[in-house]
Image: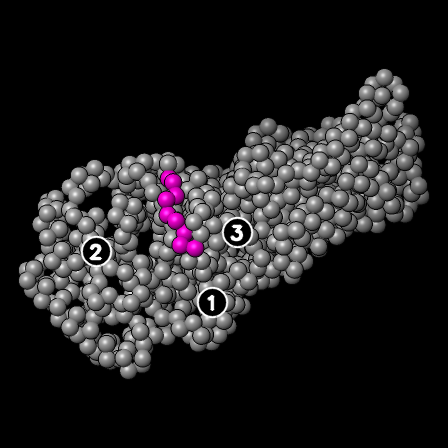
């Protein structure tokens, strides 16, 4: 079915048509695989930012042909449709957006030809200028004789219809009878693609009829390319109308994005683009209620609009999402570190690990598939995808870490522990069933929806039993040794944040799809929180101080500990005064201990429960103090906080890296700041790495604990790698006119040269490592004060924060708070300020991070709110610019060969940013 006009409205320009060109038709080819690939990637490659969606939806409303084509249509139904077309958006919403005086209406109303007089009368009574369209010419099959179809068109036009939907004889197309089709369409000035446009069609339209969906992206892409080709050949503009199956706001946004990308802004106006739909307006209105609550728009200029995407709730949801991702990701590391430190996995439940493995396999499949192909499971909902980027990244990391833990179970001592047969059968059975569903889908028996639902509910069911084996193992052993409690605390925190994020999104979207659409995530959060409480209760209440309940396997796994404890049971034979003093001050009854093993267990229990308030406190070494405080809440809290700031600071690099990759551009990201970051992390890495593994080089006489923790070392390594990666992006992606300042280059090179001189002096025996390390520390300290200054200055000059991802700033701020908090906790535990004075670079990093993050957040959310300097492809459709942009390509040319031929009506120069729109397209030849 195709669209044309008769007695055109004032704002529409007729297509005069052109002679039938068989050569042109003959050389046109369609590459179907390329069309499908291009259409499949459009939804993700040209996704619309949330802060712009309300504006796009307003544009979609103006392009809707509000339709009623029911067999029981009456004058009352048509009148109600006309009233809705004249006032498609609630007045209070329009007032909140500053659009109340714009006269916003739909593109047209579309009815049967017999109902045209009712529509014309109603619109005239309410003084509306909304055009009336009518389906004629044998709708929907187009099988009536040509004479009858012409009479139906004449009747509709005489009744007041200004636009006509007609159906061509599709048999002419299938049989390649182009001349017959040309003559038929010329008689009605209606047509299909090239032939129809030559005959004078003003619009072309996707087929409608008995099928549920006719407006597919692949078909639309071919027809839009034909419109563009026709314009380039003749100079005549032809509109496009997708119809059939467009029911959700999300569909409307995708079609608008397609038109903007292929034909430019002008083809997103109602005079050249219409959407044929009956239920679409209701879904758009429902979405606008959530998007436009705080929106303000001035006409079609919404650059200053305060969208929901910039409200505190959305920011909180994003930070919460990354927060639970950090917690859940980090909860894997304490256990892996514990296994590595002990070189044993005794006390760590293999059954729990098996359930974790099967759950994360299904969770990974579900999240990756739904994130990149949401239409497979949410095809009819029209809702936002409930699976976020954090879910996908966490699923990948969790799967990798679980595999690593499985490898540890094979490598390290596991005593007599084995995995239960029921766990093996459950895991294998679940995977076999999943494989069966995939095979059925391969033979077109099942569906992806069924596969994904299965993965979701496997994760849901398995989550209820994942932690139970560990709880049971702790109960049998009356001890939590071998299972790191820090992982449990992080896991519980992740569960709380996961549920909180879903609730925030439900509040923002005014919908429960974020909960009901991601049952695995909900189950993971709730069950994780429940079992975290149980395991924490076991560790801190039920089995606190029950380290003596360890079995024979634990003693077998640590021969060095065993021999040293046996030696400690005979103080007279010991030469170490400190340990002897500790044992002498603690009476350890060894009655009824007839074996060496029994004595070892007794003494070990006594050491774990002894207190430093006894005689010999001043002799307790730092090692012994760590043993006695390892089960205290403050020590656990310090460890959790340490991993927390490590995760915040580490992941703070990822939003900016992702932003650069998504935009394929680094404009707005300060190169000077990146240079200072690179210098600071080089010195920070050298300092932390050396002091952690060789603390005697700088704390030789203090006798204090090493203030550089494992988290500091890992963060320094990751930060250096991420900074180098960002530097590579600056060389690869478009950087516009931005350059790094000469003073930055000079400062960085000078500092590195000074470090090289100190290392060379040490090599010749003149200096010392202490001096080199102190130099690294103070370079980091000094550089930290100027690191963020270039970004603040760049934002000030541009009066915008676009190009610099605010998510990284928020995470950086959280890392600074947690970093300082961890140092304070350790100072309190050890009654010493060496954790601060001994790690000046870390202290400086935390404080300066807080200060500059506050400035950057203030710039983003207060000073330059809404001042985004976006590129043309990211610019909102309602830009108000009256430009005429059309892109030319040879019929069979690759996307890379696109060249801009359209000339702006207000500016004769071509737009380089418009041209950049095509630089990231695939190389597929489409039409």
Q: Do residues under tags 2 and 3 come within 8 Å of each other at their CB atoms?
A: no
**Which mark's residue is nearer the viewer, 2 or 3?**
2
Name the secondary structure under disc 1: loop
Q: Quadrant of the N terminus?
A: bottom left
Horizontal side, residue 249 vs residue 463: left or right: left
What is the quadrant of residue 438 in the picture?
A: top left
Give the labeled residue for mark 3.
Answer: 870
At horizontal 34% and vertical 74% (from top left) the residue drawn is 86
Kindly identify which residue carries mark 1: 299
Check the image and report above or below for 483 versus 51.
Answer: above
Residues shaded magenta: 898-906
Q: Which residue is found at the position 25% from the left and 70% from the top?
A: 132
Q: Secondary structure at mark 3?
A: loop
Looking at the image, is 765 positioned above or below residue 163? above
Instruction: Answer with mark 2 or mark 3, whichever residue precedes in sequence.
Output: 2
Q: CA distance from mark 1 to mark 3?
A: 19 Å
Q: Are marks 1 and 3 in contact (CB under 8 Å)?
A: no
């Amino acid at each position: 079915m195709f669209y044309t006009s008769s007695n055109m409205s004032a704002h529409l320009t007729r297509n005069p048509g052109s002679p039938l060109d068989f050569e042109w038709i003959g050389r046109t080819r369609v590459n179907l695989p390329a069309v499908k690939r291009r259409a499949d990637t459009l939804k993700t490659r040209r996704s619309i930012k949330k802060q712009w969606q309300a504006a796009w939806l307003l544009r979609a409303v103006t392009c809707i042909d509000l339709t009623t084509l029911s067999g029981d249509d009456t004058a009352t139904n048509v009148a109600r449709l006309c009233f809705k077309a004249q006032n498609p958006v609630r007045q209070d919403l329009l007032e909140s957006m500053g659009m109340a005086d714009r006269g916003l209406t739909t593109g047209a109303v579309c009815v049967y030809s017999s109902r045209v007089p009712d529509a014309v009368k109603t619109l005239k009574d309410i003084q509306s200028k909304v055009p009336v369209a009518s389906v004629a010419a044998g709708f929907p099959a187009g099988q009536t004789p040509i004479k009858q179809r012409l009479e139906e068109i004449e009747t509709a036009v005489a009744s007041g219809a200004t636009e006509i939907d007609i159906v061509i004889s599709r048999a002419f197309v299938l049989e390649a009878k182009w001349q017959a089709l040309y003559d038929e369409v010329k008689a009605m000035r209606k047509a299909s693609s090239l032939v129809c446009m030559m005959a004078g069609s003003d619009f072309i339209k996707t087929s409608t009829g008995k099928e549920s969906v006719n407006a597919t992206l692949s078909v639309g892409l071919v027809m839009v390319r034909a419109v563009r080709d026709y314009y380039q050949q003749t100079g005549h503009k032809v509109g496009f109308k997708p119809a059939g199956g467009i029911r959700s706001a999300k569909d409307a946004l995708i079609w608008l994005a397609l038109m903007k990308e292929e034909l430019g802004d002008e083809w997103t106006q109602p005079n050249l683009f219409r959407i044929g739909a009956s239920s679409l307006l209701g879904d758009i209105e429902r979405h606008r209620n959530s998007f436009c609550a705080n929106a303000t728009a001035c006409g079609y200029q919404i650059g200053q609009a305060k969208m929901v995407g910039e409200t505190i709730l959305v920011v909180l949801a994003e930070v919460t999402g990354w927060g639970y991702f950090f917690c859940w990701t980090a909860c894997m590391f304490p256990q892996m570190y514990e296994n590595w430190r002990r070189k044993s996995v005794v006390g760590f439940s293999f059954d729990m690990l098996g359930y974790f493995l099967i759950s994360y396999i299904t969770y990974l499949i579900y999240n990756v598939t739904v994130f990149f192909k949401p239409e497979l499971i949410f095809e009819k909902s029209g809702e936002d995808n409930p699976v976020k980027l954090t879910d996908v990244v966490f699923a990948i990391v969790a799967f990798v870490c679980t595999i690593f833990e499985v490898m540890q179970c094979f490598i390290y001592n596991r005593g007599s522990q084995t995995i239960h047969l029921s766990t093996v059968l459950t895991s294998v059975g679940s995977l076999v069933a999943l494989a069966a569903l995939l095979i059925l889908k391969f033979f077109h028996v099942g569906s992806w929806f069924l596969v994904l639902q299965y993965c979701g509910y496997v994760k849901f069911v398995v989550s209820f039993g994942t932690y139970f084996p560990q709880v049971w193992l702790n109960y049998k052993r009356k001890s939590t040794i071998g299972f790191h409690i820090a992982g449990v605390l992080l896991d519980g925190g992740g569960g709380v944040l996961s549920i909180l994020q879903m609730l925030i999104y439900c509040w923002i979207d005014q919908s429960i799809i974020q909960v009901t659409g991601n049952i695995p995530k909900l189950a993971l959060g709730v069950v994780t929180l429940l079992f975290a409480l149980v395991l924490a209760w076991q560790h801190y209440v039920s089995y606190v101080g029950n380290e003596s309940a360890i079995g024979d396997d634990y003693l077998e796994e640590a021969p060095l500990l065993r021999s040293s404890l046996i030696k400690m049971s005979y103080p007279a034979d010991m030469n170490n005064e400190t340990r002897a003093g500790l044992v002498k001050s603690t009476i350890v009854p060894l009655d009824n201990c007839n074996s060496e093993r029994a004595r070892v267990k007794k003494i070990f229990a006594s050491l774990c429960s002894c207190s430093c308030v006894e005689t010999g406190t001043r002799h307790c070494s730092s090692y012994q103090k760590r043993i006695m405080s390892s089960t205290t809440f403050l020590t656990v809290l310090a460890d959790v906080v340490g991993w927390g700031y490590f995760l915040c600071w580490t992941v703070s690099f990822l939003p900016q890296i992702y932003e650069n990759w998504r935009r394929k551009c680094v404009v707005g990201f300060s190169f000077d700041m990146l240079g200072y970051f690179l210098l600071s992390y080089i010195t920070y890495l050298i300092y932390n790495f050396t002091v952690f593994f060789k603390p005697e080089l700088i704390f030789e006489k203090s006798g204090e604990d090493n203030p550089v923790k494992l988290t500091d070392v890992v963060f320094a390594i990751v930060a250096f790698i991420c900074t180098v990666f960002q530097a590579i992006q600056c060389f690869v992606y478009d950087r516009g006119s931005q350059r790094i300042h000469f003073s930055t280059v000079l400062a960085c090179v000078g500092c590195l040269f000074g470090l090289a001189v100190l290392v060379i002096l040490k090599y010749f025996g003149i200096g010392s490592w202490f001096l080199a390390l102190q130099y690294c520390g103070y370079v980091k300290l000094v550089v930290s004060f100027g690191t963020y200054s270039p970004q603040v200055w760049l934002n000030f000059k541009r009066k915008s924060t676009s190009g610099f991802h605010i998510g990284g700033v928020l995470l950086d701020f959280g890392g600074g708070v947690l970093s300082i908090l961890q140092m304070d906790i350790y100072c309190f535990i050890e009654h010493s300020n060496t954790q601060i004075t001994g790690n000046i670079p870390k202290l400086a990093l935390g404080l300066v991070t807080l200060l500059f993050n506050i400035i950057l957040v203030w710039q983003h959310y207060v000073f330059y709110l809404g001042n985004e300097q976006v590129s043309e492809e990211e610019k909102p459709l309602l830009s108000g610019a009256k430009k005429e942009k059309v892109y030319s390509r040879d019929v069979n040319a690759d996307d890379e060969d696109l060249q801009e031929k359209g000339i702006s009506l207000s500016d004769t120069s071509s737009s380089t940013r418009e041209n950049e729109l095509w630089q990231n397209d695939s190389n597929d030849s489409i039409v």
